[in-house]
Amino acid sequence: MNLEKLSALSDDALLTLADKLGLMVPADLERSFLIEALLEALEEDSEEREGALDSSERIEETKYSGSGTDFLETSLDPGWCSDNRYNDTMIRLLVRDTSWAFAFWDVNDEERAQLRAGETGTAFQGYFLRVMEENGRESSRSADHFDIPVGESDLQWYINLPRPDSRYRIDLCCRIGGKARVLARSNVVQTPRGSLAEDSSFMDGKTVELLALSGFGELDINPAEDRHPSRILSGAEVEE
Amino acid sequence: MRMDRGYLALVLNAHLPFVRRPDYPRFLEERWLFEALSETYLPLLRVLRNLEADGVPFRLTLVLSPTLTAMLADEVLRERYVAWLDRQIELAEKEKERTAGDPQFEPLAALYADLYTSDRDDFTILYGRDVLSGFDYFYKKGRLEIMTSAATHAFLPLYRDVPEAVAAQVETAMISHRRHFGKVASGFWLPQLGWYPGMEEVLKAYSVRYTLVATRGALLGKPVPKYGSYTPVSCPNGLSVFVRDARATDAVWSEYTGYPADPVYRDFYRDIGFDLPLDYVSPWLEDGTRSFTGFKYWAVTGRTEEKNPYDPAAASAKAVEHARKFLDGRGDQIRKAAAYMDRPPLVVCPYDAELLGHGWFEGPQWLESLFRLAKDRPGLRFVSLGEYLKLHPENPASMPEFSSWGSGGFAGVWLDGSNDWIYRHSYKMLDRMMELAERFPNETGLKERVLNQASRETLLVMCSDWALLIRAGKAGAFARRQVEDAVSNFQRIYEMLCANTVGTEWITRLEKRNNLFPGINYRMFRRKRS
């Protein structure tokens, strides 16, 4: 079916698709070769996507049976939503896992233009994100922070956070005349724990055995840091 | 009186996202519901009826998500399902003719003729098109415990900073459950088992008594749960949290070693919609594009394109064997865990309901065999989650950690480079919905209808299935359009309300299309004041 769909596309649309799939093709490549290359790339992409899914996702996917050629459709028409903005100055932070968070932000066009124009004697030197670890007291700022420079056209970023089980906030900032100015402040997020909440060496031996029987060893969970990891990992093994 | 050595709790999560397009004569994605009805929900009810007729004791916990419940109760979809069944029966007859005289394939064509005819009889005659009444019968008898789930299957940890959003998902679900089943749901299934500390407060506020979390979330809990995953834990506010069992999960879900991967079972992917000439199958394809028809004649065989013909008798025997193996495995777990416990261990086995039957064709037979075989296993008792809490109301204190059952154990499936753009829109919609609820707290008539529709669109955009499908690629374009539709519908409503002009015709059309949650009240989005 992909062959039929591709054959119906204009040369320009084929080249756009090739670009989206990361194919380097000479502009004068014969149409039939281009379609062949695209089919191959689409197949590879589909395999990669399949490979990225775990068993439960693949099983869940069976609920949604369809033609399976949607990537082509998505590539040809990425939709209007993915680039849409709301033209307000804001930043929001979402936790993904123990060490990654996703930030999305925006700066109002008028404010953006004013910043770019600069104030008398000051020069706009770009935007950056200031990532701060919160120490639990509201509105207090920890000295522990780092900055990530971002481009004017950037509107989102995945941020590697230093520690699990910690609270973070991000300020969307710009630098003007060497000074940092906060444009928007995110919500505070908490990264999840990546290891046991207690020292296993002080746990009841029965609990240690039950954790092992619960499949602790296969869950890729760290025992509490620097605390006798072998104590948990060598617990009773269960054979099916 | 028998002594219970251990408990098994099977939990089936029946859920599909809301897809209903009466503005199209036929709509491809509505098939998701029809296929699940034919291969999972109706066969599951047949299993329960068989067990009841034979006096086999069974206890099962079933999640019926609010979007699925809304679709099962919808007249348009019920009508369309009957029409779809008629087409399937017609194809089955045609297949019987095509395969006539073929000892391997004619019986398979007959198998599908029987399946769809039974489905039609059950749906139209036995249940009068109301499948929910079939589940309600066992619910009222106490054999089946029905849980509800978030209104539109939102992955709640990604909305934890907007308590109004999480509360709206829970409140709408609880109202939907009471509307359809006449009682308050005791159990609440967290979509994708997405839990975060703080969730217990929201659930408790709506009188929920229990929920479930992934093994990882429980083991990372604080304090570490005394009995691991073998009992529920109790949050500081008293909410009970059951724990998914990792090994029971693997036995069924694992792609390569799970039961559904056995070579003799029916292969899901090989379908006559792809195998037979297009002009033959095209009347049964929604838009003439090759797709699944539901007629599958081949066995899993292995990781090869050369499949063996499907042998239903061998597959049935295997389902019984796997049921026995499953009980052996859980029995072994219980025996080992019991050595370290002062009460009978509990093994909680939650699965997607649609895996049984639709994904794994022999799943309902496996389920039926589990209950039949367990009858002769002294000490092993199937319980529903609520029943367990009656037997053991006191459980170790612990607060589970943020977690899910998705790959990686946290939010990675629903927040990655392919689907992260959704959240800019859903958060903006939530923000504006709360603004509208504050600005118009006492509206009636048309304006109230408009605000209620805005609430529906806000809930719909939060659906985690769209993020999953966009990530997976399959049906990704459809999923993206569902998000875009909700965003665009909401924007139009917001602009209408800001301009104080309402397009009556348009809003009526939208209400008729996205008609879920008839009793919705937009005021649930008013800002929570601490």
Image (cartoon, coloured by chain):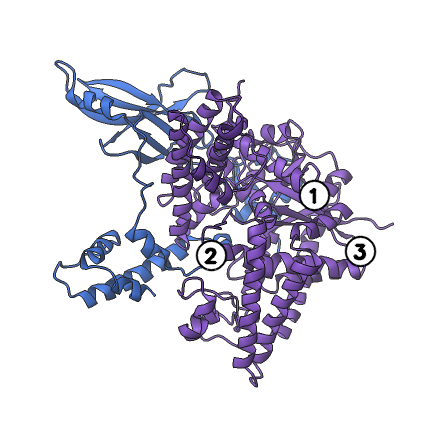
Chain colours: A blue, B purple
**Is residue A16 found left or right of B331 in the rendered image?**
left
Q: CA distance from mark 1 to mark 3?
A: 20 Å
Horizontal and vertical percent position of residue A143: 35, 19
Q: Secondary structure at mark 1?
A: helix
Could you tell which of marks 1 and 2 lies nearer the N-terminus? 2
Q: Mark 3 is on which residue type?
A: Pro
Q: Nearer the viewer, residue A240 or A123?
A: A123
Horizontal and vertical percent position of residue B270: 47, 69
Chain at numbered mark 3: B
Instruction: Please give the name of the residue rendered at 67% of the width and 29% of the height, measured from the top-left corner.
Output: B238
**Is residue B93 found left or right of B397 in the rendered image?**
left
Q: Mark 1 is on which residue type?
A: Leu
Q: CA distance from mark 3 to mark 2?
A: 54 Å
Could you tell which of marks 1 and 3 lies nearer the N-terminus? 3
Could you tell which of marks 3 and 2 lies nearer the N-terminus? 2
Horizontal and vertical percent position of residue B191: 54, 42
Chain at numbered mark 2: B
Asked if the residue at tag 2 contacts the one at tag 3, i.e. Cβ–Cβ closer than 8 Å, the answer is no
Quarter location, residue A123:
top left
* Residue carrying label 2: B25
| Number of dots carrying numbers | 3
Q: CA distance from mark 1 to mark 2?
A: 42 Å
